[in-house]
Structures are given as C-alpha cells and as structure tokens.
Image (cartoon, helix red, strand yellow):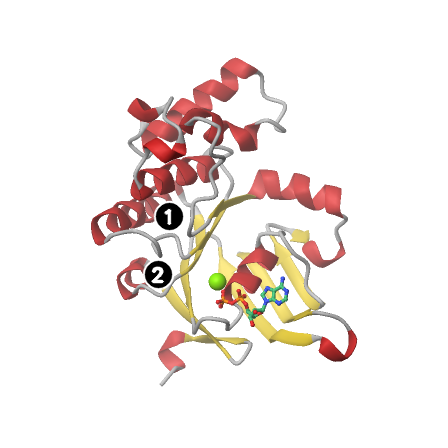
Amino acid sequence: MSLVSARDLRKSYGLGASSVEVLHGVDLDVAEGEFVALMGPSGSGKSTLLNLIAGLDRPSSGELTVADARLATMGAADLARWRGRHIGFVFQLYHLMPTLTAAQNVEVPLLLSGLDRARRQRQVQIALDVVGLSHRNDHKPAQLSGGQQQRVAIARAIVTDAPLLVCDEPTGDLDRASADEVLDLLGAFNRDHGKTIVMVTHDPAAAARATRRLHLDKGRVVDASQVH
Ligand SMILES: Nc1ncnc2c1ncn2[C@@H]1O[C@H](COP(=O)(O)OP(=O)(O)O)[C@@H](O)[C@H]1O
Ligand SMILES: [Mg+2]
C-alpha cells in the first residue's frame, strides 16, 4: 500500500511574472515500509518536495495523498493536527530549541497529544533511550555534539510513533562516525519498527542504506538507476 502518492505535483514560488516553478509535475509512490533516498543537485527542489510530503507547505497543483490524507485540500489547523500524528521530521541542522533540555525538546511534539505529564515523560525516556542518550536528559543543545543533537532530534521525530519519517540531509553536517550512528538508527527504525522513511541526501553512504534511490531531475522524480 502506498503511504505517499503524488500525481503531477507542481510547486511554484513567487507571484505573477516573477513566479518560478520548482517542481514540474512530480509523480511518486512510496510504499509502507520503504526507505527511500532522494538525491539531486542543490536547488533542484528536494527540500521543497519533502516539505510538501510532510505537510509543511502546500503544492501549487496536483494530487498528494500521504497516510490516507489528501494534503492539497486540507485547512491549516487540520494539517497541523495530521502532521503531529503522522510525520516525524529530521532536519540537517537539528532545529532543537536552544533554551530547552534534551528531554524537553523531545517532549515538544507530545504537548498537543493530550497525554498526561507522566505518560509524556515515559515516552520521552523511551525515545531518548532508543537513541542512546538517556544519560543526557538535562543537557541543553549547546552542551551536546552535533551527532548527539541529531540523535535528540531523531528521538523527537519518533516520540509520537509517527509512521513516516521525513529527513532532510540528516547527516549533512556530521562527521563520518556520527553520520553512521544516525544512519544505523534510521535503518533500525525502518527494518525493526516498520517506519517508512523518505530521506534527502548527498551522501552516497547514506543513500546506500536506503531500499530505493530516486533522483530529482529537472523538477521531476526519476529512478536513480535511470540517471546517467
Ligand atoms: N520559500 C521560497 N521562496 C522562494 N523560492 C524558494 C523558496 N524555497 C525554495 N526556493 C527556491 O526553490 C528552488 C529549490 O529549492 P530547494 O527545494 O530548497 O532545493 P534543494 O533542497 O534541492 O537544494 C531553489 O531555486 C530555491 O531558491
Ligand atoms: Mg534542501
């Protein structure tokens, strides 16, 4: 079953004569349980496409269904609620809140979940444990290495048990050893916990971990094996 289905997806930025189309009709299907790497040159629209899939932005036209929701027609409040239940997002530069501890950062997506405090803290501890950072609960981001910050961000992405992880160059700012730790975690979530992952990357070692590699080329998605 497709978790992500895009048909003739287009996205333009700007208005009128200055409008520029970045995605020129993307067709894409990602089945439940896949780990897809999305590659392509800088500026080709990879982040644009990920943001559409994650419901952070809206397409200009086309059909986009993610986890049974038709995103193009949803209102902002519904979209935010849907995102909280279905999407874990991992960014290149972690996007942790600098004034919050690791545990508080991981708790953020749970604040709208309706879970009581004890239950939230239990889930936060499980998520930090899974990424190997339960001994860093009370550290602020500035007291953590880049690799540790990204593992906190991954704990935040999985704490709601969302079915789809959307990762935008998650190893782009990390040294090889830290990058491999992050990729080990993503691989394990995919294999052992059935998480579907769509990951943008420039890193061939990261792309090699995926079960399928796609290329964004001239505003369309093509199978990487077809790229010369
Ligand atoms: N919010 C925005 N407003 C205007 N142009 C944008 C915006 N976001 C991205 N773009 C443009 O869209 C193109 C694709 O950007 P992006 O999706 O970030 O590419 P990639 O992630 O592949 O490097 C670039 O030319 C970029 O300048
Ligand atoms: Mg990008």
The structure residue drawn at horizontal position 65% and vertical position 56%, both measured from the top left corner, is 57
2 and 1 marks in contact (CB < 8 Å): yes
The structure residue drawn at horizontal position 43% and vertical position 44%, both measured from the top left corner, is 94
Query: Type of residue at label 2?
Result: Thr
- Residue 206 drawn above or below residue 145: below
- Mark 1, ligand 2, within 8 Å: the answer is no
Name the residue carrying label 1: 190
Across and down, in percent, residue 135 comes to: 29, 23
User: For numbered disc 1, what is the local secondary structure?
Assistant: helix
- Residue 35 drawn above or below residue 77: below
**Frontmost residue, 33 versus 12:** 12
Name the residue carrying label 2: 211
**Frontmost residue, 8 versus 219:** 219
Q: With 126 as the anchor, is 7 left or right in this view?
A: right
User: For numbered disc 2, what is the local secondary structure?
Assistant: loop
Query: Type of residue at label 1?
Result: Asn
Instruction: Give the CA separation, mark 2 to mark 1.
Output: 10 Å
Image mark for residue 52? none
Q: With 155 as the anchor, is 11 left or right in this view?
A: right
**Which numbered disc, 2 or 1, marks the residue that appears first in the sequence?**
1
Identify the residue at the far top of this view.
Answer: 118
Across and down, in percent, residue 223 comes to: 43, 75
